[in-house]
Image: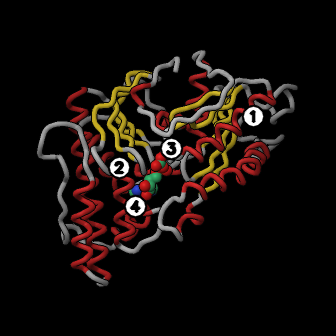
């Protein structure tokens, strides 16, 4: 089975084709970071309009990047050729959570293609895409596992029992961790998106020069809260003024506080569940120091840690193609209407819905 995946939930337009025999056949991505940078964050209306412009050229790009004779990294016939039928067997799109206008562009595009090709379309939960992204790698983890999902909109610890069986163990009460990175970047006068910019500045900071709290780590439980940390950063930025080293020390102190907090909660969740595999996914999972820290700690306690490759930590079409293929193969399917759910909890999923 071969599935086209379409991601348009926020500020990346991502398309990819995944084949259950040959693996990932091609993927293409357009980031809107440049478009939103001058506004200091994502402008939903601009995001939707840009997805509409990008979808068709990206579809062409995915299909033309498809391996031709002699240069094939994967075996398999070219789209539309060889098999005589439609280029794929199904279309998966991100149906939520996300910006509703942005989601609807992908939903309408996916449904139209599926209708034209006479194949099924399926709406996929964006966070299920993130949590299955390590399955795109060669050394994919097996079920069950613990997932730390850290993105711009979510901070979740999930007990992944099986495909479609997700038990949320803890989540944030306020800001998501990626959001905290983005707000810290803004306070430090860095660009959008903030995560990579804060991480780069933190490399120049002195460890321990500025200490921030590790929120909710002293009390039991697996909940998170990052809004207090944001306020502490604001106060430190006001004190630091324009002094370059002081700003780098704040970035370092902030990143250390976030990494410590996430590591403490992961260790607690591993102890609580007895799970032997940790999957880290979502945009913040691209953070190199977070990856190194969790890798080190997990090695010490004999837990296997799995990440998607860096480019599949942030939003992409490959994870949606993969998740959609698993659902279609398990017999799931949507009625022929297009739909999107801007708010949608991961633990409402099952393999039939
Ligand atoms: O998963 P994602 O691409 O989109 C959502 O589903 O939200 O995550 C985007 C978030 C942004 O908040 C961005 O600042 C953060 O991931 N991010 C990072 C890094 N790269 C992206 N945060 C920390 N360090 C990074 N290297
Ligand atoms: Zn995401």
- The image position of residue 39, as x and y in percent, is 51, 68
Q: Disc 2 vs disc 1: Cβ atoms closer than 8 Å?
A: no
- The image position of residue 264, as x and y in percent, is 21, 45
Q: Disc 4 vs disc 1: Cβ atoms closer than 8 Å?
A: no
SS for dot 4: helix
Q: Which residue is mark 4?
A: 182
* Above or below, comparing residue 305 to residue 241 in the picture: above
Q: Disc 1 vs disc 3: Cβ atoms closer than 8 Å?
A: no
Can you tell which of label 4 and label 1 is closer to the viewer? 1
Determine which of the numbered discs, if any, sits on residue 176 in the image.
2
> Which class describes the residues within 10 Å of circle 3: few (<14), some (14-19), or many (20+)?
many
Left or right: residue 282 versus residue 118 is left
The answer to which quarter of the image holds residue 168 is top left
Q: Give the CA separation, mark 4 to mark 3.
A: 17 Å
Q: Give the CA separation, mark 3 to mark 2.
A: 14 Å
Can you tell which of label 3 and label 2 is closer to the viewer? 3
SS for dot 3: loop
Determine which of the numbered discs, if any, sits on residue 12 in the image.
none
> Which class describes the residues within 10 Å of circle 4: few (<14), some (14-19), or many (20+)?
many
- The image position of residue 320, as x and y in percent, is 58, 36
Can you tell which of label 2 and label 1 is closer to the viewer? 1
Which quadrant would the N terminus be assigned to in this image?
A: top right
Q: Which residue is mark 3?
A: 98
Kindly tell me whether mark 3's CB lies below 8 Å from ligand 1.
Answer: yes
Q: Give the CA separation, mark 2 to mark 1.
A: 34 Å
* Above or below, comparing residue 81 to residue 215 in the picture: above
Q: Residue at x 34, y 26 (%)?
A: 167
- The image position of residue 32, as x and y in percent, is 59, 59
């Amino acid at each position: 089975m071969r599935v086209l995946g379409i991601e348009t939930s926020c500020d990346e337009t991502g398309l990819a084709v995944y084949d259950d025999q040959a693996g990932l056949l091609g993927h293409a991505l357009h980031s809107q970071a440049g478009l939103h940078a001058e506004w200091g964050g994502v402008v939903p209306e601009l995001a939707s309009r840009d997805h509409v412009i990008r979808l068709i050229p990206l579809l062409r790009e995915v299909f033309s990047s498809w391996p031709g004779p002699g240069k094939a990294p994967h075996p398999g016939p070219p789209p539309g050729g060889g098999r005589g039928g439609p280029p794929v067997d199904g279309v998966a799109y991100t149906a939520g959570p996300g910006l509703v206008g942005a989601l609807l562009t992908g939903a309408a595009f996916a449904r139209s293609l599926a209708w034209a090709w006479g194949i099924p379309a399926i709406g996929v939960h964006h966070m299920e895409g993130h949590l299955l992204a390590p399955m795109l790698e060669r050394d994919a983890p097996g079920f069950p596992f613990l997932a730390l999902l850290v993105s711009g909109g979510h901070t979740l610890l999930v007990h992944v029992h099986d495909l479609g069986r997700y038990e949320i163990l803890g989540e944030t009460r306020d800001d998501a961790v990626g959001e905290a990175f983005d707000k810290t970047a803004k306070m430090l006068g860095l660009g959008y998106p903030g995560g990579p910019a804060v991480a780069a500045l933190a490399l120049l900071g002195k460890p321990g020069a500025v200490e921030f709290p590790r929120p909710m780590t002293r009390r039991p439980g697996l909940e998170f809260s990052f809004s207090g940390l944001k306020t502490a950063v604001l106060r430190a930025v006001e004190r630091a003024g324009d002094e370059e080293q002081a700003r780098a020390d704040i970035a370092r102190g902030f990143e250390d506080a976030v990494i410590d907090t996430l590591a403490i909660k992961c260790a607690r969740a591993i102890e609580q569940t007895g799970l032997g595999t940790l999957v880290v996914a979502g945009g913040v999972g691209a953070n190199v120091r977070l990856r190194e820290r969790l890798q080190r700690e997990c090695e010490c306690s004999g837990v296997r840690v799995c990440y998607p490759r860096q480019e599949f930590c942030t939003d992409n079409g490959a994870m949606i193609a993969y998740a959609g293929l698993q659902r279609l193969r398990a017999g799931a399917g949507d009625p022929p209407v297009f739909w999107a759910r801007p708010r949608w909890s991961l633990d409402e999923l099952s393999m039939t819905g």
